[in-house]
Image: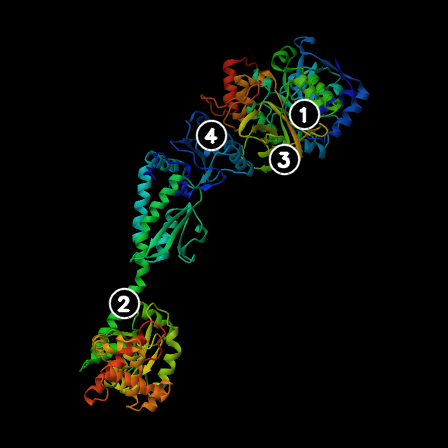
C-alpha cells in the first residue's frame, strides 16, 4: 500500500465530521463527497448565480426568507455545481424543499447562530485543510490525556468527532465503552495491553464515509491506544501495589517485637489476630509455569477476592498467606471451607493450600503460619486444589521440607543399579513398601496387593543387585532415596505409574 | 361584438374568474343573477372601443373595492352604481358619457356592466389592470399618470363617500372606509376622457374576458381548453399534479398588502417528477419549478381542474387536490420597467425580476437590482417621466 497523502481540499463530509459543519443540522440525505474550495455569504439571491463551482453557499437571512428563496438557492447551487447550501436556523424549510435538495443532490444544512460567523469559520477551515486536521488531532490528543478511565477516553473521542460513533470492543465482542452503534463500522484499530497481548479493538462508524474521513478517524483512534492500555492496566497495578504494602506490614507484624503503630495499621485494615488463629498458606503447585510474582499476585488477589471476600490475602515468602480468626476456631472448620471453595478461585496460577494449627495472638499466628507453610509444601505435590493440614500430616512435614532437586539426583545415582534394570520401577516400589512396613513382607504384600512370595522374589533380585537394605546403617538412606524417587515420579506427568508419596 | 347581452354574462364571469390569478371567488352568483335580470330589463349594454367615442367624453372606471366574501354576505341593493356615478358627476360637475372597468376580473367584470346598464351608458372595452391587483393604484391609468382622485364610493351601509386626496392617501382612506362600511364599496374612480383611455387603459379587456370565458365553457376537455387558451391569450402550462403542501404565513407579511402569504406545492405525477411551488397572497404571485422561477407577477398564474377544466381558487384547494398550473401573460404595459416597478415581484416582497413575456426558465436575478418602491417613489418617478395630468 502506497503512503497516502491526505488530499489538500476538504470535502463536505469532512466538514461535517470534524469541521464547522459538525454543529449544523443536515436536512437532506445526500452524498457528501463534493469538494469545498470557496465559501460565499449570500444576502441577495443575485449572488448565487455568479458563484464558482465547489462553493459552500451560506445564506444570510434576507436571502433565506420563505421556502421559495431556499428553493431558488438550491436550484442555483445545482446549476453552478456548488458544494452545499447552508441556511440560517430561522428559515422555513418544508418537506418539499428537502425533497428538492435530495432530488438535486445538493447538501442542505441548517445552522444556529450568526450566518456570517459561520461563513468565517468555514472559510478558515477550507483555506487550510491540513491545519484543520492537525488541529483536530491535537485537540483530541490533549482531551484524551485529561481522561483516566476507559469510558472517559472513548467519550472524549465521541465528543470531538460528532459525525462518528466510536466504541471499544473486547475480544469477546462485548462493548467496553462508547456507543454500541459503532459496532461493525468501517474503521477498526486493535488495542494491545501493556505487555503486548491482544485485548480489544477500537471501532468507528462514520455517518458519511469518505476516504479522507476514514483516514482522519484512524489517526485519532491510534492516538488513543496507549492511554487506553494504560488505563486498563491500572486496576492490576493497584492490586499488586496493595499486595506489596500488605506484605511489608505482615512481616513487620510477625517480627519479634511489633510496635503499637504496626498493630494499629493492621487493625485498620481489618486484620484480626487476638483470638485463635488458623493460618493458611497458598502456593502454586509443583510444575506450574513460572510467572512473575507481581503479576501472579494481582491475579491471585483478584481471584481470592471473588471467593473469600472478607479474608485478607498477603504475599509471603514464595506464596500467599491468609488466616481465620475466632474464639472457638478449629482447623477442621477452616479445612472444610477451604476444600469447598479453593477450586472455585479463578486465576492463572494453580494453587494448593496448607493449614496450620489454631493458636492465639500474634505469636500464635506466627507459629500457625510456619505450620501452614510446611503443610503447603506437601500439598503442592498433590496437585491443584489440594488442601493439607499440619495436624493430619504430622511428622511427614519433615520430609516435605527436603530439598527435592538435590536429593533426586543423589537418589538416582545411589539406586542406579535398580533404575537401569527393566523392572527397576517395580523394585523400587517394592523396596519402599517393605521399608514402610518396617521390614514385614506380609504387610508389604498386602499394601501392594500381591502375594508374599512375589515380594520375597523381588527382594532377592534387589539383594542380588547389591542393594543391602538389611544393613541398619543404610536402611534410612535407602528409604529416603526410594521415597524421593517415587515422589518425583508421582509429581511428573502421568505415564501410567500409580502411587504417590508414602 | 359590440354589445354585452345577458347570454354573454356566464362567459364574462368565467373569463373574469380565470384572469383573477387564483384570487377569484365563485360566490358571485348573486351579482350574476341580478345583472341578468337587469340586462333583460334594460336591454343589452353597448360595448365600445375608446376611439369610437368622441375624444372628450367624460369617463370613469367602475370597480368594487374590498372583499367579495363580504359582498356575498351583504349584497348590493341595486342602486349603488347609480348612486356612485351621480356622486362623482356632482363632484366633477360633469355628466359621464361612458364607464370603463377598474379591473375586468372576478366581480369587477360585472359591476361596470351593471353601471352601464343602470345608467344607460356605453361600456368602454378597456380596464386598468387586465387582471387583479390588490391595490387600487396598481393600474395602467396610474402608470400613464392619471390620478385616481376625485373618486366616489358607495357601500353596503348606504354611505356615499367622495374623496379628494393625494393618490397614496386616497388608497388608505378608502381602505379604512371600506372596513367600516361592511367590507366592500363600489367606486367610481380614475375620472378621465375617452381619448386618454385609449392610451392609458388596457384596451380589449372585456371582450378578451368574454372570449376566454367562452373557451372555458365550451371546451370539451382540458387539452381542448389548453389549445384554445393558447390561441387566445398565448398561455402555457407549467405542469399538472397533486397538491402536497399547503402552508400559510410562510413569508414575512407586508403590512401594506391585504391577506396573508401562503405557499402551495404541487408535485407532478408524470415523469420527470418535479415540484412546482406557488407563492400566493390572495393572488398567485410566483411559480417555481424545482427551484427555478417559471412565472412571476405580473404573469397571471391560474389553477385549473384537470378533470373538467374549471378554474380553482387558492382558497378552495386542499391537500391532495389535482391541479393544472397555467400561466397567461399579462398586458404588455406591465412588463415595462415602470410597470415592473409598480407590480413586479419586488413590489410584492420577492427580490427578483419577472421572466418576461417569453416565459421559459431564464436566469432571473438582475445585477442592478433596485430596492422596493413604495407608492410615493413610483408616483414621483412617473411625475418625472410621464404626463401627470390631474383631473
Q: CA distance from mark 4 to mark 2?
A: 71 Å
Quarter-of-image position of residue B155:
top right
Residue for point 30% across, 89% down: A437
Callout 4: few (<14), some (14-19), or many (20+) C-alpha neighbours within 10 Å? many
Question: Which chain contains the residue that carries disc 1?
Answer: B
Residue A286 rendering spot, x and y as whole percentages: 29, 73
Q: Are marks 4 and 1 in contact (CB under 8 Å)?
A: no
Please name the residue that numbered disc 3 is placed on. B243
Quarter of the C terminus of chain B within the rendering = top right
How far apart are the alpha carbons under marks 3 and 4?
A: 25 Å
Q: Secondary structure at mark 3?
A: strand
Marks 3 and 4: CB-CB under 8 Å?
Answer: no
Q: Is residue A381 left or right of residue B153?
A: left
Query: Mark 2 packing: few (<14 Cα in 10 Å), some, or many (20+)?
Result: few
Residue under pointer 2: A290
Q: Nearer the viewer, residue A4 or B344?
A: A4
Q: Chain of mark 4?
A: A
Separation of disc 3 and disc 2 at Cα?
81 Å
Q: Nearer the viewer, mark 4 or mark 1?
A: 4
Q: Nearer the viewer, residue A444 or A342?
A: A444
Image x and y of residue B138, in percent: 58, 22
Q: Which residue is mark 1?
A: B18
Is residue A141 found left or right of B324 in the rendered image? left
- Parent chain of label 3: B
Q: Is residue A398 visible?
A: no
Amino acid at each position: 500500500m502506497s503512503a497516502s497523502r491526505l488530499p489538500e481540499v476538504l470535502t463536505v463530509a469532512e466538514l461535517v465530521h470534524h469541521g464547522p459543519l459538525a454543529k449544523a443540522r443536515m436536512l437532506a440525505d445526500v452524498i457528501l463527497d463534493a469538494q469545498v474550495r470557496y465559501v460565499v455569504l449570500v444576502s441577495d439571491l443575485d449572488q448565487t448565480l455568479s458563484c464558482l463551482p465547489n462553493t459552500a453557499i451560506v445564506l444570510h437571512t434576507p436571502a433565506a426568507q420563505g421556502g421559495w428563496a431556499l428553493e431558488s438557492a438550491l436550484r442555483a447551487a445545482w446549476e453552478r455545481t456548488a458544494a452545499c447550501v447552508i441556511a440560517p436556523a430561522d428559515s422555513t424549510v418544508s418537506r418539499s424543499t428537502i425533497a428538492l435538495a435530495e432530488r438535486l443532490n445538493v447538501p442542505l444544512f441548517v445552522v444556529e447562530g450568526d450566518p456570517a460567523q459561520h461563513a468565517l469559520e468555514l472559510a478558515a477551515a477550507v483555506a487550510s485543510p491540513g491545519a484543520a486536521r492537525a488541529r483536530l488531532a491535537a485537540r483530541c490528543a490533549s482531551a484524551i490525556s485529561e481522561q483516566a478511565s476507559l469510558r472517559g477516553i472513548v467519550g472524549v473521542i465521541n465528543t470531538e468527532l460528532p459525525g462518528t460513533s466510536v466504541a471499544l470492543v473486547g475480544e469477546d465482542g462485548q462493548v467496553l465503552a462508547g456507543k454500541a452503534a459503532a459496532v461493525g463500522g468501517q474503521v477498526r484499530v486493535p488495542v494491545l495491553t501493556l505487555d503486548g497481548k491482544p485485548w480489544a479493538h477500537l471501532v468507528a462508524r462514520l455517518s458519511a464515509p469518505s476516504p479522507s474521513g476514514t483516514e482522519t478517524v484512524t489517526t485519532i483512534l491510534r492516538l488513543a491506544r496507549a492511554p487506553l492500555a494504560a488505563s486498563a492496566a491500572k486496576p492490576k497495578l493497584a492490586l499488586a501495589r496493595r499486595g506489596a504494602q500488605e506484605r511489608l506490614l505482615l512481616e513487620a507484624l510477625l517480627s519479634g517485637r511489633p510496635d503499637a503503630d504496626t498493630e494499629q495499621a493492621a487493625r485498620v485494615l481489618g486484620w484480626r489476630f487476638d483470638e485463635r488463629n488458623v493460618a493458611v498458606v497458598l502456593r502454586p503447585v509443583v510444575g506450574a509455569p513460572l510467572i512473575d510474582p507481581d503479576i501472579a499476585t494481582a491475579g491471585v488477589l483478584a481471584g481470592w477476592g471473588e471467593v473469600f471476600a472478607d479474608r485478607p490475602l498477603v504475599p509471603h515468602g514464595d506464596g500467599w498467606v491468609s488466616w481465620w480468626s475466632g474464639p472457638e476456631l478449629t482447623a477442621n472448620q477452616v479445612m472444610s471451607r477451604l476444600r469447598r471453595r479453593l477450586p472455585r478461585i479463578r486465576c492463572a496460577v494453580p494453587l494448593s493450600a496448607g493449614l496450620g494449627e489454631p493458636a492465639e495472638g500474634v505469636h500464635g499466628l506466627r507459629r500457625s503460619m510456619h505450620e501452614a507453610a510446611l503443610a503447603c509444601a506437601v500439598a503442592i505435590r498433590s496437585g491443584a486444589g489440594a488442601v493439607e493440614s499440619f495436624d493430619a500430616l504430622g511428622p511427614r512435614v519433615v520430609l516435605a521440607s527436603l530439598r527435592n532437586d538435590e536429593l533426586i539426583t543423589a537418589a538416582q545415582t545411589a539406586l542406579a543399579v535398580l533404575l537401569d534394570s527393566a523392572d527397576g520401577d517395580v523394585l523400587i516400589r517394592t523396596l519402599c513398601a517393605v521399608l514402610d512396613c518396617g521390614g514385614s513382607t506380609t504387610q508389604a504384600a498386602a499394601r501392594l496387593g500381591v502375594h508374599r512370595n512375589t515380594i520375597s522374589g523381588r527382594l532377592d533380585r534387589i539383594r542380588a543387585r547389591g542393594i543391602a537394605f538389611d544393613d541398619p546403617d543404610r536402611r534410612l538412606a535407602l528409604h529416603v532415596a526410594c521415597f524421593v524417587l517415587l515422589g518425583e515420579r508421582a509429581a511428573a506427568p502421568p505415564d501410567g505409574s500409580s502411587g504417590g508419596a508414602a | 361584438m359590440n354589445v354585452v347581452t345577458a347570454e354573454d354574462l356566464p362567459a364574462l364571469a368565467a373569463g373574469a374568474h380565470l384572469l383573477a390569478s387564483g384570487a377569484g371567488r365563485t360566490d358571485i352568483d348573486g351579482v350574476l343573477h341580478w345583472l341578468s335580470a337587469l340586462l333583460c330589463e334594460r336591454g343589452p349594454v353597448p360595448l365600445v372601443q375608446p376611439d369610437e367615442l368622441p375624444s372628450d367624453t367624460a369617463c370613469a372606471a367602475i370597480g368594487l373595492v374590498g372583499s367579495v366574501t363580504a359582498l356575498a354576505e351583504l349584497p348590493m341593493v341595486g342602486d349603488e352604481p347609480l348612486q356612485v356615478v351621480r356622486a362623482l358627476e356632482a363632484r366633477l360637475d360633469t355628466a359621464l358619457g361612458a364607464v370603463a372597468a377598474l379591473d375586468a376580473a372576478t366581480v369587477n367584470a360585472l359591476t361596470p356592466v351593471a353601471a352601464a346598464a343602470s345608467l344607460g351608458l356605453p361600456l368602454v372595452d378597456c380596464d386598468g389592470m387586465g387582471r387583479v391587483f390588490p391595490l387600487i393604484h396598481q393600474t395602467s391609468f396610474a402608470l400613464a399618470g392619471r390620478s385616481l382622485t376625485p373618486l366616489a364610493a358607495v357601500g353596503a351601509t348606504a354611505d356615499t363617500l367622495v374623496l379628494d386626496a393625494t393618490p397614496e392617501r386616497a388608497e388608505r382612506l378608502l381602505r379604512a372606509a371600506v372596513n367600516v362600511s361592511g367590507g366592500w364599496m363600489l367606486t367610481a374612480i380614475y375620472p378621465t376622457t375617452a381619448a386618454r383611455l385609449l392610451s392609458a387603459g388596457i384596451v380589449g379587456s372585456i371582450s378578451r374576458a368574454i372570449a376566454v370565458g367562452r373557451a372555458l365553457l365550451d371546451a370539451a376537455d382540458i387539452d381542448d381548453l389548453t389549445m384554445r387558451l393558447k390561441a387566445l391569450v398565448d398561455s402555457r402550462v407549467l405542469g399538472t399534479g397533486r397538491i402536497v403542501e399547503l402552508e400559510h404565513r410562510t413569508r414575512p407579511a407586508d403590512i401594506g398588502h391585504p391577506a396573508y402569504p401562503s405557499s402551495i406545492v404541487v408535485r407532478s405525477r408524470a415523469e420527470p417528477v418535479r415540484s412546482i411551488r406557488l407563492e400566493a397572497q390572495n393572488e398567485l404571485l410566483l411559480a417555481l419549478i424545482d427551484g427555478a422561477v417559471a412565472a412571476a407577477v405580473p404573469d397571471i398564474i391560474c389553477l385549473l381542474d384537470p378533470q373538467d377544466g374549471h378554474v380553482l381558487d387558492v382558497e378552495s384547494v386542499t391537500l391532495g387536490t389535482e391541479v393544472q398550473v397555467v400561466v397567461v401573460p399579462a398586458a404588455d404595459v406591465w412588463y415595462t420597467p415602470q410597470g415592473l416597478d409598480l407590480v413586479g415581484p419586488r413590489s410584492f416582497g420577492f427580490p427578483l425580476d419577472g421572466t418576461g413575456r417569453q416565459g421559459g426558465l431564464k436566469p432571473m436575478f438582475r445585477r442592478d437590482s433596485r430596492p422596493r418602491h413604495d407608492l410615493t417613489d413610483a408616483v414621483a418617478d412617473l411625475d418625472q417621466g410621464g404626463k401627470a395630468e390631474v383631473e
